[in-house]
């Protein structure tokens, strides 16, 4: 008889257990149903009061890139996401650069969430030191993600339900407030969309650039391609639907908020403006509830982004862009990349003690926009340049998506560009070291069936 040691071992792979609803909930939690609320005050000022219009314009802009992501996921259903798409369609080295830029973005988001959650929690329990809260949220994010992909999906559903209930209360309270106070009739209800007294094209464009932050994170859906039932269909649908759902929900939230607090009235604090809107609509108790809701949303986002970062590192490790023995390993029991989950969590915790909130927030877009440009370029090559039949529907989405992302990228703040450039330089040096000056193969892509 063949001994157990002599039997061929089946490679441990990620478990396909997520449906379209799981993906949609994951995408909504990564972006957050309350995505525009932290930037509501700044967005209102930047747009000259037409914040709703900028949210909708940004949704159209991001849909082009979302289509490219979904279509490339149908070709390469891999946890490596943009790293794989660019590496297979353009060049392995370009794929590595894209994956490295994505890694920065994915690892910064849980770091930012640890910092923000810790400081928000101190508002409710100021006697507990910041470092204690930081360690608590690190353990919370990492521990729950180590429980497995289905556990994370159930938690995402609970978070989405909780935030949905709070926002439903806000809509009811805001409607009662608006109807119970005098206004200028029908014209009053159109001002959040178009205010002739404050409208400026430059303000609208600037506001749209800021409003794009509302959608950053939808690409995380594609990192779950290897854990999805029917990924060639569901990834595209979930990516596009996430942008649409978040877009209309965000526009509705901002619309009601602007009606409750007209732009001509200054906010007590621009950074937390929406909380004051909630307090005006329903009273001091809802001020506290909204604070808690935003905190819960940040917890969900931190967990989901850590999950996405772990899957991205797994894709890069399995492809030998990073050391396979550590990053390409899957836990046998839970069938998750355990090493990567812990690595991302520890890195985020260390960064929470060292980095400032403002710098982390500004850097988030640097890596994301590079990845977006890369995916749009890969989609353009695959579906249009190399296609036997040239179709306009295969040309416009990636072309427009790539152009919009480039314009946003070149307008990032100088500190973000400098910090991002340092990160990219470090990645280039690492790639050169692994390939003896880029003379050897950098990546060995694996695309599961």
Image (cartoon, rainbow, N blue to C red):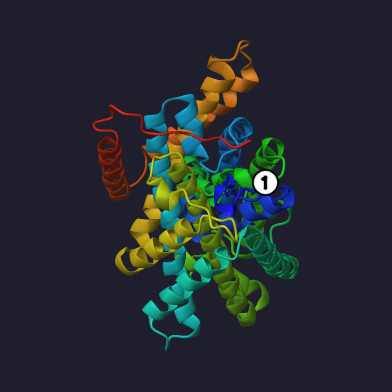
Q: Nearer the viewer, residue 353 or 61?
A: 353
Residue 408 appears in view: no
Residue drawn at x 41%, y 68% is: 115
Q: Secondary structure at mark 1?
A: loop
Q: Residue furthest bottom?
A: 127
Q: Residue at x 31, y 29 (%)?
A: 440
Left or right position of 440 against 388? left
428 up-or-down from 144: above or below: above
**So how many labels did they put on this image?**
1
> Is residue 148 found left or right of 273 in the rendered image?
right
Residue marked by disc 1: 228
**Residue toward you, 196 or 22:** 22
Instruction: Tell me residue 86's x, y (percent).
Output: 47, 31
- Where's residue 73, x and y in %? 60, 35
Q: Residue furthest front?
A: 1
Nearer to the camera, 114 or 211: 114
Query: Is residue 403 positioned above or below 231 on the image?
Result: above
Residue at point 29%, 33% (across, down):
435
| Residue 118 quadrant | bottom left
Q: Is residue 393 above or below residue 21?
A: above
Q: Is residue 325 visible?
A: yes
Crowding at mark 1 (Cα within 10 Å: few <14, some 14-19, many 20+): many
| Residue placed most toward the observer, 138 or 411 | 138
User: Residue 218 location in percent, x, y?
Assistant: 57, 47
Q: Quadrant of the C terminus?
A: top right
Q: Is residue 436 above or below residue 338?
A: above
- Provide residue 77's location: percent of width, then percent of height: 60, 37
Where residue 284 sits, quadrant-wise, is bottom right
């Amino acid at each position: 008889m063949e001994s157990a040691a002599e039997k061929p071992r089946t490679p441990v792979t990620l478990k396909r257990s997520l449906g379209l609803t799981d993906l949609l909930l994951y995408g909504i939690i990564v972006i957050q149903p309350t995505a525009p609320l932290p930037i509501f005050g700044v967005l209102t000022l930047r747009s000259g009061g037409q914040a709703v219009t900028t949210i909708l314009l940004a949704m159209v802009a991001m849909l082009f890139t979302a289509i490219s992501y979904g279509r490339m996921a149908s070709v390469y259903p891999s946890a490596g996401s943009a790293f794989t798409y660019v590496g297979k369609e353009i060049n392995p080295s370009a794929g590595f650069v894209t994956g490295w830029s994505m890694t920065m973005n994915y690892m910064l988001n849980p770091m930012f969430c640890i910092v923000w959650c810790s400081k928000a929690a101190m508002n409710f329990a100021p006697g507990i030191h910041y470092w204690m809260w930081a360690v608590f949220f690190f353990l919370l994010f990492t521990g729950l993600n180590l429980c497995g992909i289905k556990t994370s999906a159930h938690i995402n559903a609970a978070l989405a339900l909780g935030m949905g209930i709070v926002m439903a209360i806000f809509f009811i309270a805001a409607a009662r407030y608006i109807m119970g106070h005098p206004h200028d009739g029908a014209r009053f209800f159109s001002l959040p969309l178009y205010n002739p007294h404050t409208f400026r094209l430059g303000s609208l464009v600037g506001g749209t650039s800021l409003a794009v932050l509302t959608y950053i994170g939808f690409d995380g859906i594609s990192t779950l391609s290897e854990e999805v039932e029917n990924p060639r269909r569901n990834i595209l649908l979930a990516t596009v639907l996430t942008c649409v759902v978040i877009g209309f929900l965000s526009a509705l939230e901002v619309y009601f908020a602007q009606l409750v607090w007209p732009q001509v009235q200054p906010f007590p604090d621009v950074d937390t403006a929406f909380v004051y809107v909630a307090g005006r609509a329903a009273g001091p108790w809802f001020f506290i509830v909204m604070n808690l809701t935003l905190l819960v949303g940040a917890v969900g986002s931190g967990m989901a982004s850590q999950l996405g970062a772990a899957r991205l590192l797994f894709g890069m490790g399995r492809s030998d862009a990073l050391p396979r023995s550590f990053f390409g390993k899957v836990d046998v029991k839970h069938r998750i990349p355990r090493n990567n989950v812990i690595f991302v969590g520890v890195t985020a915790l260390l960064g929470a003690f060292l980095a400032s909130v403002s710098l982390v927030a500004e850097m988030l877009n640097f890596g994301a926009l590079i990845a977006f440009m890369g995916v749009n370029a890969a989609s353009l090559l695959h579906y249009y340049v190399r296609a036997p039949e040239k179709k306009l529907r295969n040309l416009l989405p990636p072309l427009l998506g790539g152009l919009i992302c480039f314009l946003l990228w070149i307008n990032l703040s100088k500190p973000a560009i400098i910090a991002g450039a340092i990160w990219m330089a470090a990645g280039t040096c690492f790639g050169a070291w692994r390939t003896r000056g880029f003379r050897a193969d950098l990546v060995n892509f694996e695309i599961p069936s």
